[in-house]
Amino acid sequence: MPAAATVKTVETTPIEGQKPGTSGLRKQTRVFMQPDFLENYVQAIFDVIGNPGNELAGMTLALGGDGRYFNDRAIQVILKMAAANGAARVLVGRDGILSTPAASAVIRARKTDGGLILSASHNPAGEDGDFGLKYNIPAGGPAPEAITEAIYRRTQEITTYRILDEADDLDLSALGETTLGGMTVEIIDPVAIYAGVMRDLFDFDALRALFKSGFTLRFDAMHAVTGPYAKAILEDELGAPAGSVMNATPLPDFGGGHPDPNPVWAKPLLDLVMGPDAPDFAAASDGDGDRNMILGRGVYVTPSDSLAVLTANAPLAPGYAKGLAGVARSMPTSRAADRVAKRLGINTFETPTGWKFFGNLLDAGLVTLCGEESAGTGSDHVREKDGLWAVLLWLNILAERRESVAGILQAHWREYGRDYYTRHDYEGVDKAAAEALMDELHQQLAALPGKSFGGLTVSAADDFAYDDPVDGSRATGQGIRIFFQENARAVFRLSGTGTVGATLRVYLERFEDDPARLGDDPQEALAAVIKAAGEIAGIAAHLGREEPDVRT
Ligand code: G1P
Ligand code: ZN
């Protein structure tokens, strides 16, 4: 690098479309690649988190991403901007890689002033796919709304950004320290800190013994970021046979796939567990490693059920042996975990969609586990959901109980009853039409109670609002809930992570204390709820669609 790297102040103007959604700023990759788009947003973050006047002086940040297309370019730009804004040190994952939960673990373990995570989660990657950027706070979690709003406001007024002039790109392939301008860049092993956290929580000896006894596992990393993590922990450290981790090499376009671990996008894995060569246990994670899908021989565990089973069994793992303080779930997640929490006499919270709402509850020690129906599960070990953590907790439970996944699930339903659950997504629909559907629903709310739709009677309906018990902030307009007298519920909300048009999500559930009565297929068990929800919202009329694009 030329010794003369100087700070350049570049004039710019606000760029449209920098409002962060459910999980940071997520856009089509080509949008992120527009001139100044990334730079403006990064400077807005630095302006908000920096010290007025001397910017990032004295600050240390973590930096890494899921390795998707543009990750490498964006990392170099962010490093040069961090240096130009006076940061003292940046910890960057080797080759620019950090899974989202690993980034959270690094921020916490190294007590940084937060971090920047580059990811669009499970959204397809590549030049024609999506890209994303998110600032996480020093506690390790996604920035709360007050901060993301401040960043957004800053994007609207920005006139300049700072970047090093004439600095070469850094080689990020070798561990160790180097300097960039006046800043230290520390290239860290992306797996080490995270693996240490897992070692402290779980009984690795018991897991090694489990694999030694012939227990079989398939973990599908879907060509995304969890490959190196799963290989290091499951195969190298715990002794799962080589090849247990599939699609383990992260690719910039995720191999052209859609790394969202659910029965639709991870269908080959689902087919495997339903077929004659099923392993004892199978799981998948998503693009940035924070989601999980849990499967056993012949069985798929819904994320809502998984949260309930983990709540009931977590104390079997050493890290949770003292019991749980409580469990929080996002509002659209089924109420299965609440039943367990009630029985255990621990706290329960219902939060809006998005992991950022769990942070305060975890920081305050009010809950230990959290989960979302969208395949996110986690605990107070980091401040993000954590795919591999969920896999290891399941494995630890299996190692202790020595029962099959299906056996554990059946026993759980016998004890607590079953919350049948499905989510229907209408993707890429016309934005105005989707908003009109939600507006109309809204207007009907007060008139719905007492009315019947295809055999179900509405008992209550509202627009979900959440009062944070820790900081007193209020989040409104978080989704429409319709409750039925028959122990059923339908929830409607628009996605905040899509990048094209709008996506309507309809969440449907029904509780049954004798699961034998409704059979095993959630779509059949929920047929009446699905029909009622369709009628109430006029889905076909508004969206011109008879069927959802995705049912999970
Ligand atoms: C989706 C999920 C939500 C999750 C978010 C980030 O957001 O539904 O649970 O927190 O992705 O992974 P949505 O597109 O529904 O706004
Ligand atoms: Zn993700």
Image (cartoon, rainbow, N blue to C red):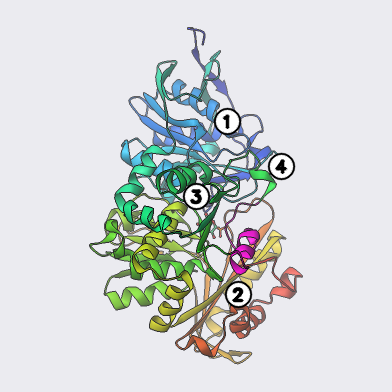
Mark sitting earlier along the chain (1/3): 1
Image position, residue 522 (x, y; %): 58, 78
**In the structure shown, which secondary structural element does the residue marked by tag 1 occupy?**
helix
In three-dimensional space, the C-alpha distance between marks 1 and 3, rounded to whole angstroms, equals 32 Å
Q: Which mark is residue 241?
A: 3
Residue type, label 4: Asp
Start and end of the magenta stretch? 258-277
Image position, residue 193 (x, y; %): 36, 39
Mark sitting earlier along the chain (1/2): 1
**In the structure shown, which secondary structural element does the residue marked by tag 3 occupy?**
loop
Residue at mark 1: 72
Residue type, label 3: Pro
User: Overall secondary structure of the magenta stretch?
Assistant: loop
Mark sitting earlier along the chain (2/3): 3
**In the structure shown, which secondary structural element does the residue marked by tag 2 occupy?**
helix
Q: Quadrant of the C terminus?
A: bottom right
Circle 1: is it few (<14), some (14-19), or many (20+) Cα within 10 Å? Answer: some
Circle 2: is it few (<14), some (14-19), or many (20+) Cα within 10 Å? Answer: many
